[in-house]
Amino acid sequence: MTHRTVGLVAILRGVTPAEAGDVATAVLAAGFDAVEVPLNSPEPLESVRRIRAAAGPDARVGAGTVLTPDDVRRAADAGASLVVSPNTRPDVVAETVRLGLESYPGAATPTEAFAALDAGAGAVKIFPATAVGTAGMRAWASVLPAGAALVPVGGVDAGNLGDWARAGAAGAGIGTSLYRPGDAPGTVGDRAAAFVHAWASATRQSATER
């Protein structure tokens, strides 16, 4: 089983519709691969709509903290192309796949990771990443189908991003170390550029070592 490279996903928890378009545009311009608005943010679906309008039809715009198939449908109607969950629910994954969207369900154990992939997930969100660790992720990768994309989320920051890249992560979700509610788009864009540079450097090093 193989998947596309996931890359860096900006988790814009707490973003408001008024700022969503500008913040997301700054992050994507800095080189992030996708942005995600968790559904426990203020008016999240309106933020998804505004990001889609600002970023264009080809941008990878996601909804996060998606818990039910109905959430999936509402996110799709708002323009999301990526569905991210904190848990593994096969019916959520199945509905995401049925609608032609990318599915990143959360898993905390290899059993959940297998269930996510069996349901059709395009990648597995390792959550919380701090509990699994890079050694745990390597152990998962040794038993999961070859090429399964693993994406750590939860506690990933500038200090450990390189460790995850060198351990073989397909991408990473970056939250509070990138964006907090009220941060100016320019500030967030500068942080995003630093993350992109660190990720690129670490993945190049990892490729050389292999």
Image (spheres, helix red, strand yellow):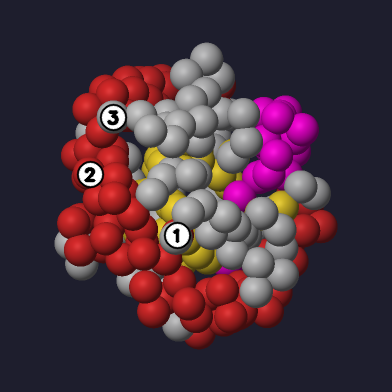
Q: Mark 1 points at which residue?
A: 44
Q: Give the Cα separation between the discs numbered 2 and 3.
A: 9 Å
* Residue lying farthest to the top in this orientation: 159
| Number of marks in the rendered image | 3
Question: In this view of the protein, which residue sits in the foreground, 4 or 39?
Answer: 39
Q: Can residue 109 be seen here? A: yes
Mark 1 or mark 3, earlier in chain: 1
Q: Give the Cα separation between the discs numbered 2 and 1.
A: 15 Å
Q: Mark 2 points at which residue?
A: 22
Relative to 20, is 151 on the left or the right?
right
Residue for point 23% across, 38% down: 26
Label 3 environment density (alpha carbons within 10 Å; few <14, some 14–19, many ≥20): some
Residue for point 75% across, 35% down: 132
Q: Can residue 58 be seen here? A: no
Rendered image quadrant of residue 154: top right
Q: In the rendered image of this protein, does residue 200 appear above or below residue 9?
A: above
Q: Is mark 2 on a helix, strand or loop?
A: helix
Question: In this view of the protein, which residue sits in the foreground, 57 or 142?
Answer: 57
Q: Give the Cα separation between the discs numbered 1 and 3.
A: 19 Å
Give residue 205's position: percent from left, percent from top. 41, 20
Which numbered circle lies on residue 184? 3
Q: Which amino acid does label 1 sit on?
A: Pro
Q: What element carries label 1?
A: helix
The quadrant the N terminus occupies is bottom right
Mark 2 or mark 3, earlier in chain: 2
Residue for point 77% across, 58% down: 112
- Residue 34 magenta-drawn? no
Relative to 99, is 133 on the left or the right?
right
Question: In this view of the protein, which residue sits in the foreground, 90 or 118?
Answer: 90
